[in-house]
Amino acid sequence: MEGTEVLIVGAGLAGLAAGRDLSRAGLSAHILDKSRGVSGRAATRVLELDGKVVRVDHGAQYFTAKNDQLRILIPDLVQLGLVREWTQGFPILNTQGIKSRTAGHPRYICPDGMSTLGKVFLQGLESKDQPLALETHALVTGLYKSESDAGWKVLLEDGRVRAGRVLVLNMPAPQALKLASEFLKPEVRMALEAVRYAPCWAAVLVLEHMPYLDWVGLEIEHPVLAWAALDHTKRAVQDPPVLVLHASAAWSQENLELSPAEALGKMIGAAQELFGDWVGQCRTAMAHRWRYALPTQTHPWPYLAQDDLIFCGDWCVGPRIEGALESGWATAEYLIEYLKP
Ligand SMILES: Cc1cc2nc3c(=O)[nH]c(=O)nc-3n(C[C@H](O)[C@H](O)[C@H](O)COP(=O)(O)OP(=O)(O)OC[C@H]3O[C@@H](n4cnc5c(N)ncnc54)[C@H](O)[C@@H]3O)c2cc1C
């Protein structure tokens, strides 16, 4: 840690993309994350069923590559078997039944789960890339400005301290606001306060029987449910059938404080009404509460900088995976210039 130039809190895709570019530019980056793995909301849950590992995407479902910087990575990722095109659009289910499909452009997935994306940036794709320095299970609970020398110190939940010349916070804006509150200039505080997120309850259902359906993902116009995906259609191997459900933003907001078991019961009930009783016949099922799932009000710039304190994530420029990566890359570009001797 001694002499770390950039300390990054949050191993989401923005933090990892920034860390990778900083490291390629010869700057030392150290990444901390409270979770046990990387990739944040591009999350994959690993289940063990009858001794077999089953991977399920319960956060981000797929990604698009409209941005040139991401698009040029796709052929290599596909060649390495890390990414593949899943579909070009989704049917929409509403009260009249299934209607037209959404716009036809590639939706990419990772056969080993969406968290592969985070691992790609952690490990690097180029032969000269070294793995980024990462500490997991590292919940940051406080920030300190060093008085003796330039730079930042962060306090971890277990009392450990980490330091860096500059500090990057890669996390949803409300969490960054809470952590950095006492250090913010009024205009930076206002910008963070203006960001809004919608929550999402997600449910994972490992089914008893393979359903007979002709879609892989379905957008739903319904008071409770907004999305259903047959997650096993992403996997290379013959995995058991898995249905992923996402509740609508409005329902998730209204029911945010339900217990996971209560939310799961209500989502299964709604899905049974839409699809049939087979939805309830599960080998195992679980629900996950995403308090900050998708930004609904974003900040117009790709990052927010207050000198040596930088904020980045999908709430900058545009929501979703593409926005998070763009924000991370722009953060690195700013810091490479800022830290130039
Ligand atoms: C249910 C759901 C569905 C989605 N569907 C899609 C989709 O289909 N397509 C798409 O493109 N995008 C989708 N998204 C959005 C996409 O996942 C995000 O835009 C993207 O992953 C955000 O990356 P990020 O780096 O900005 O933040 P995050 O992924 O949120 O990363 C932030 C990281 O910071 C860590 N952290 C936070 N606070 C602390 C702390 N105090 N100390 C240490 N670590 C901390 C967290 O553990 C996390 O790893 C979805 C998201 C959800 C939740």
Image: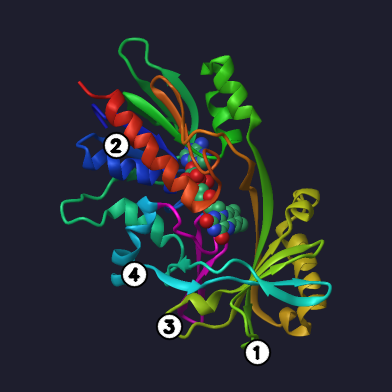
Between 323 and 199, which is closer to the camera in this rendering? 323
Please report contact status of discs 1 and 4: CB closer than 8 Å, yes or no: no
Q: State which tag comes first along the sequence, 4 or 3.
A: 4
Q: What kind of element bears circle 1? A: loop
First in sequence: mark 1 vs mark 2: 2
- Disc 4 within 8 angstroms of ligand 1 (CB): no
Question: Visible in this render: residue 12?
Answer: no
The extreme left residue here reads 128
Residue of label 3: 237
Residue where numbered disc 1 is placed: 212
CA–CA distance in space, label 4 to label 2: 28 Å
Which colour style is shown?
A: rainbow
Q: Which residues are magenta?
A: 42-67
The quadrant in which residue 5 appears is top left
Residue sitting at the far top? 148
**In the figure, 187 relative to 24: above or below?**
above
Quadrant of the rendering where the C terminus is positioned: top left
The one nearer the camera, 264 or 295, is 295
Percent position of residue 307, x then y: 40, 19
Depicted 310 relative to depicted 87: above or below: above
Q: CA distance from mark 1 to mark 2?
A: 48 Å
In this rendering, the label closer to the viewer, 4 or 3:
4
Q: Nearer the viewer, mark 1 or mark 4?
A: 4
Q: Residues within 10 Å of mark 2 (few under 14, many from 20)?
A: many
Q: Residue at x 42, y 27 (%)?
A: 154
The residue depicted at 49 percent of the width and 60 percent of the height is 63
Image side of residue 136 versus residue 291, left or right: left
> Which mark lies nearer to you, 1 or 2?
1
Question: Pointer 2: what residue?
Answer: 29
Which is nearer the N-term, disc 4 or disc 2? 2
- Residue depicted at 44% across the width and 72% down the height: 85
Instruction: Name the quarter where the N terminus is drawn.
Output: top left
